[in-house]
Amino acid sequence: MDEQEMIIMNLIVNAGSARSSSIEAIQYAKAGDLDKAEESMQAAKETVNEAHHAQTEMIQAEIRGEKTPLNLLMVHAQDHLMTSLLCLDMAQEFIDIYKKLA
């Protein structure tokens, strides 16, 4: 696996982890454990930042003239990141609602 593929895999793994932690946070909030929900959200934010860092590396490389080939793996990685970012935002909204209900 070359360096670029490693960066893409890093993006996929971290974005997926962030999404999972976001869903976990919603589940904790639904069960009334708001402290655990916040912990899961913090973990989600940290891992999505790692994914975003990987994306930024690729963008900076392209700015330097290092073209990134468009392939299914790259599309999958971008899809994972976008889905994770949306999930994070929605999870926070759900947690805020559960806090108001508590």
Image (cartoon, grey):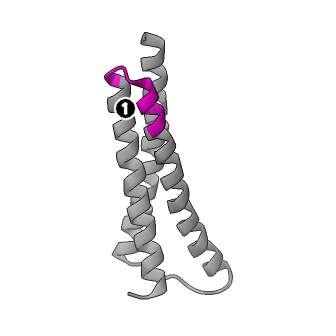
Q: Residue furthest right?
A: 64
- Residue flagged by tag 1: what amino acid is it? Ile
Q: Secondary structure at mark 1?
A: helix
Give the residue displayed 53% in from the left and 51% down from the top.
46
Magenta stretch encompasses residue 38: yes
Position of 51 compared to 30: left or right? right
Q: Is residue 44 above or below residue 75?
A: above
Give the residue displayed 32% in from the left and 31% down from the top.
27
| Quarter placement of the N terminus | bottom left
| Towards the viewer: 23 or 28 | 28
Residue 83 visible at all: no
Give the residue displayed 48% in from the left and 28% down from the top.
93
Classify residue 28 by image quadrant: top left
Give the residue displayed 38% in from the left and 78% down from the top.
71
* Neighbourhood count class around disc 1 (C-alpha, 10 Å): few under 14, some 14–19, many 20 upward: many
Magenta stretch encompasses residue 101: no
Residue 101 visible at all: yes
Q: Which residue is mark 1?
A: 26
Classify residue 32 by image quadrant: top left
| Quarter placement of the C terminus | top left
Position of residue 94 measured from the top left corner of the image (x, y, whole percent): 42, 27
Q: Is residue 20 above or below residue 1?
A: above
Name the dominant secondary structure of the magenta segment: helix
Position of residue 79 measured from the top left corner of the image (x, y, whole percent): 40, 59
Q: Is residue 72 above or below residue 38?
A: below
Classify residue 61 by image quadrant: bottom right
Position of residue 99 measured from the top left corner of the image (x, y, whole percent): 47, 17
Residue interval drawn in magenta:
30-39
